Image (spheres, rainbow, N blue to C red):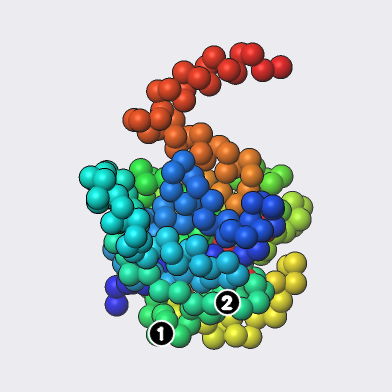
Amino acid sequence: MAVTKAVIPAAGLGTRFLPATKATPKEMLPVVDKPAIQYVVEEAARAGLDDVLIVTGRNKKSLEDHFDRAVELEETLAAKGDRDKLALVQQASAIATVHYVRQGDPKGLGHAVLAAAPHVGDQAFAVLLGDDLIDARDPLLETMLALQEREGGSVIALMEVPKDSISLYGCAAVEGAEGDVVRITGLVEKPAVADAPSNLAVLGRYVLSPTVFGLLRTTAPGHGGEIQITDALQGLIDVEPVHGVVFRGRRYDTGDRLDYLKAVVQLAADREDLGPPLLSWLREWLPEQP
Ligand code: UTP
């Protein structure tokens, strides 16, 4: 059965981005001129997943408002004849059918995914982290969905990272590489560098079999006292095939301040309207820096 549903966890506390995230979910921080999560919903829709469930936490109102109609604003823009801005406002509410579920206590990513179980039901589904952007020019989700359709089981996106930074990520033990596809034989959350089985880090895209829900229900809190998706996926490996796709394209972690700044600059530099003036200012400004 083809995957139709995408789950976007967006209930984390975003503590790395305080105080900006005190009253705003980090997924709503603007990347150039769109909130990060809009890029993620667009990515799901591009891959054919137009049933999107956002797992929300506190401060969910701005998220819901963003993907809803904004009648008053739309009427004002229409009255002014500002069609371009009107289109931008309307676009966000037309990307996909967006549903919401509350996580309650933010007990970890695994716990957030489990909150999606009633909506997802007994079918494979995609998980896209709401603060993790994949450049639209480097398709990843489509590749993962095609692999899951062919092989069944689950598919996890991986990326190569310098070995000494692997302890910031979930890490995969793999075998049998065929191009960028590997068979995952083990997963460990944020291992010490010396214990890491590879330099392949788990990034924020998954296509999961519904078997994961049963495993999440019995997964005890792990690293950081949180219910980790990585721990449940380790259990999945024992019962079903789990493949990895090694992603070599552009990816931006907007939950991290430095990566966020890089994302804004890179994506703005690529834009026709903002790129040329931004780059010419940067060229003038950089040589003046100590
Ligand atoms: P992170 O670990 O990056 O989110 O989770 P965080 O805990 O908000 O970050 P910091 O370290 O405090 O800054 C990755 C994704 O999982 C979601 C987050 O919203 C983010 O999209 N998440 C995490 C949840 O939905 N619920 C949780 O309990 C934890």
Count of marks overlaid on the render? 2
Splitting the image into four quadrants, where does ligand 1 fall?
Answer: bottom right
Q: Is mark 1 within 8 Å of ligand 1?
A: no
Q: Position of residue 281 (x, y in %)?
A: 50, 19
Task: Using residue 282 as the reference point, say whether residue 71 is left or right of it.
Answer: left
User: Does any portion of residue 261 appear in the rendered image?
Assistant: yes
Q: Position of residue 250 (x, y in %)?
A: 46, 42
Instruction: Work out which quarter of the rendered image holds the N terminus and state it.
Output: bottom left
Front-most of residues 289 and 72: 72
At x 65%, y 63%, the residue is 13
- Marks 1 and 2 sit apart, C-alpha to C-alpha, by 17 Å
- Residue 163's place in the image compared with 195, above or below, is above
Q: Position of residue 128 (x, y in %)?
A: 47, 62
- Residue 259's place in the image compared with 213, above or below, is above
Q: Of marks 1 and 2, which one's residue comes earlier in the chain?
A: 2
The residue type indicated by label 2 comes to: Gln
- Residue 262's place in the image compared with 80, above or below, is above
Rate crowding at label 1 as few (under 14), some (14 to 19) or many (20 or more) other CA atoms within 10 Å: few
The residue type indicated by label 1 comes to: Gly
Question: Would you say the residues marked 1 and 2 are in contact, meaning their CB atoms lie under 8 Å apart?
Answer: no
Task: Using residue 202 as the reference point, say whether residue 67 is left or right of it.
Answer: left
Q: Is mark 2 within 8 Å of ligand 1?
A: yes
At x 31%, y 52%, the residue is 76
At x 29%, y 73%, the residue is 2
Front-most of residues 217 and 78: 78
Quadrant of residue 163 within the rendered picture: top right
User: Where is mark 2, residue-wise?
Assistant: 103
At x 70%, y 72%, the residue is 226
- SS under mark 2: loop
Task: Using residue 15 as the reference point, say whether residue 75 is left or right of it.
Answer: left
User: Where is mark 1, residue-wise?
Assistant: 121
User: Does any portion of residue 176 appear in the rendered image?
Assistant: no
